[in-house]
Amino acid sequence: MRNTGALASDVRRRIEAQLADDVPWNRVLNSICTEPHPLAVEMASRAAHTNLGDVRIFRGTKRIEREVVRLLLELLGNPGGSGSLVSGGTEANLIAMLVARETARARGRLTERPEVVVSSTVHFSFTKVFHLLGLTPVVVPVDDDLRMPAKETARRIGEHTVAVVATAGSSEFGVVDAVDEIGPVVAGRGVHLHVDAATGGFIIPFARELGHDLPQFDFTVEGVDSITIDPHKYGLANVPAGAVLFRGAEDAGRFSVDSFFVDTPVHHTLLGTRPGAAAVSVYAVLEHLGRDGFRDITRTNFEVTRYLVDSLRAAGYELFAEPQLNIVVVRLPHAARISQLLESRGWIVSTSKRFGETLRLVVTRHVTRETVDEFLPALQQACQD
Ligand code: 0PR
């Protein structure tokens, strides 16, 4: 660290110079996160000093967090449930698996080698979670539509199973598992069913209202015990804002750690010191946009996705799968090299390590028809070079 501090103007200038080198949103076609809503940014900055790890001080901020959890539970059809705001999908999935394991313990079902049934497209955050918690994944191959098959899933449940994880919006393809078929076959087997809706949680409810044919994935489905939903993705809140929600009013409390101090409530999250700014930013967006606002944003996302798909097909590209959400995967020879070329020309796309020769394009709020019109020639040029 320097001995004598630099002038604020100097520090500011250096930070601005680095930020200016970040890729502008209108060249980003790989990100599930987007530019947060201006009100979220404004209110998060207002609450930058707050810490949800000390609710005796930040009691107003805590009230906002509780209200956000209530609003999210209501969105997902379970006003009587419980939950916490966390740092993102990874922490949400970790806490859901902790609760699943503790529930199995309480039921006397925890064996020496606890297992979790997942599909082959489950998010890699679970690799971290299983590693940390000593859980063993039992992988069900996806079907031809890249979905977790309900019957096969039920067949893999055994004496060691503590949980099943379904995904509502896979990160690679935006595929929504048939949670409405998986729920009923898992219900009554004594295992926890978790739905990872980090990606789809803020799209599917509104897309269904708009008439898109997507499976129900929320607490109205029999058997669903917990859900991950991420406001910092399609929820337009600032990073870091995730949420883990549970069916039962007491369920979030199954992972609970006491603190050293009198009058400090137990913790239900991994982080101790936690950003109140995140809660405030989510609250600002939910209240300001309401269901109408989210429905409008979803409608636009789907329209731009359709425009992208039609433009790609008209230009002769073939899709890897028919998109269910706003993630478009194109079959493309030499995809990794084309992605690198595009990046050198300012465009960010993804290529899958597991499903080679594919280019993945994510349509979110910052991706417009103009972005598509500018991207297509850049893609064509990269394919020719
Ligand atoms: N579950 C699912 C289904 C996800 O898609 C993700 C992240 C997570 C869990 C983990 O969430 P956190 O990253 O909040 O812990 N999905 C994105 C992905 O892997 C994360 C991301 C976002 C990556 C923006 C890049 C990026 O620019 O694609």
Image (cartoon, helix red, strand yellow):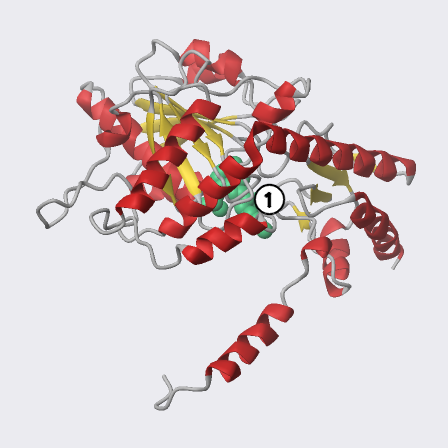
Q: Secondary structure at mark 1?
A: loop
Horizontal relation, residue 57 to residue 186: left or right: left
Amino acid type shown at disc 1:
Ile
Q: Position of residue 312 (x, y in %)?
A: 85, 39
Quadrant of image for the C terminus: bottom right
Residue at image position (77%, 39%) is 331
Identify residue for label 1.
Answer: 32
Q: Residues within 10 Å of mark 1 (few under 14, many from 20)?
A: many
User: Cβ(mark 1) to ligand 1 < 8 Å?
Assistant: yes
Q: Quadrant of residue 266?
A: top left
195 w.r.t. 284: above or below:
above
186 w.r.t. 241: above or below:
above
Q: In this orientation, does residue 113 appear?
A: no
Quadrant of image for the N terminus: bottom left
32 w.r.t. 51: above or below:
above
How many numbered marks are there? 1
80 w.r.t. 333: above or below:
above
Q: Position of residue 173 (x, y in %)?
A: 64, 35
Q: Nearer the viewer, residue 53 or 380?
A: 53
Q: In this orientation, does residue 164 appear?
A: yes
Q: Position of residue 84 (x, y in %)?
A: 34, 36
Residue at image position (30%, 27%) is 100
Residue at image position (38%, 29%) is 70
Q: Nearer the viewer, residue 126 or 71?
A: 71
